[in-house]
Image: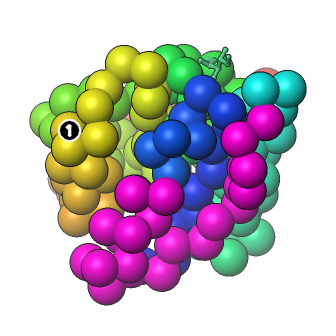
Amino acid sequence: MKIAIGADHGGYPLKADIIQVLAQAGHQPIDLGAYALDAGDDYPDFAEAVGKSLQTGQAERGIVICGSGVGASIAASKMKGIRAGVCHDTYSAHQGVEHDDMNVLCLGARIIGGELAIEIVLAFVNARFDPDERFQRRLNKVLQIEQSE
Ligand code: RB5
């Protein structure tokens, strides 16, 4: 799977390990920066880059890492077609895909350690949307909200 990944300075320490794990698992990580630790960079820039890569079809899923994961999820979810969630446990990471069709995982590198982050990332990329009628119905309602904005 093609997976776009971006991180601001708060998330930068986790990004390289996650890219390595994704590649080892047979995925194609697309590194959208930051390419160096820069305390002056801004999480919306990376959330937008990841969101755009999904919107254009360059990537199927995205991962955005900031300090808490919160800013990344707020910014990414502003974009059409992007369903981003902060997940700091493996259950949310797979259930968010299975029930909610989450397509961008947001992580807070100041909140979780590297090993847990890797398990969460693998739970996210290994999960698939369950097209059960109730999940599709709820997703359609989310999409209607997006359309009406
Ligand atoms: C950056 O210092 C920090 O505010 C940002 O990474 C993130 O935590 C925002 O949600």
Q: Badge 1 local density, few (<14 within 10 Å), some, or many (20+)?
A: few
| Relative image position of residue 40 (x, y in whole percent) | 85, 26
Q: Quadrant of the N terminus?
A: bottom left
**Which quadrant of the structure image shows residue 88?**
top left
At x 58%, y 41%, the residue is 12
63 sits left or right of 111 in the view: right
**Which quadrant of the structure image shows residue 135?**
top left
At x 29%, y 79%, the residue is 24
Q: Quadrant of the C terminus?
A: top right
93 sits left or right of 61 in the view: left
Compared with residue 30, is residue 86 higher up or lower down, i.e. above or below?
Answer: above
At x 14%, y 35%, the residue is 91
**Which quadrant of the structure image shows residue 74?**
top right
Compared with residue 50, is residue 64 higher up or lower down, i.e. above or below?
Answer: above
Tell me how many marks there are: 1
- Can the viewer see residue 95? no
Amino acid type, residue under disc 1 in the picture:
Leu
Residue denoted by label 1: 116
Q: Which residues are magenta?
A: 16-38
| Relative image position of residue 70 (x, y in whole percent) | 54, 18
131 sits left or right of 62 in the view: left
| Relative image position of residue 39 (x, y in whole percent) | 77, 26
| Magenta-span inclusion, residue 72 | no
Task: Name the quarter showing ligand 1.
Answer: top right
Compared with residue 42, is residue 71 higher up or lower down, i.e. above or below?
Answer: above
Q: Secondary structure at mark 1?
A: helix
Residue furthest toward the left? 91
- Can the viewer see residue 30? yes
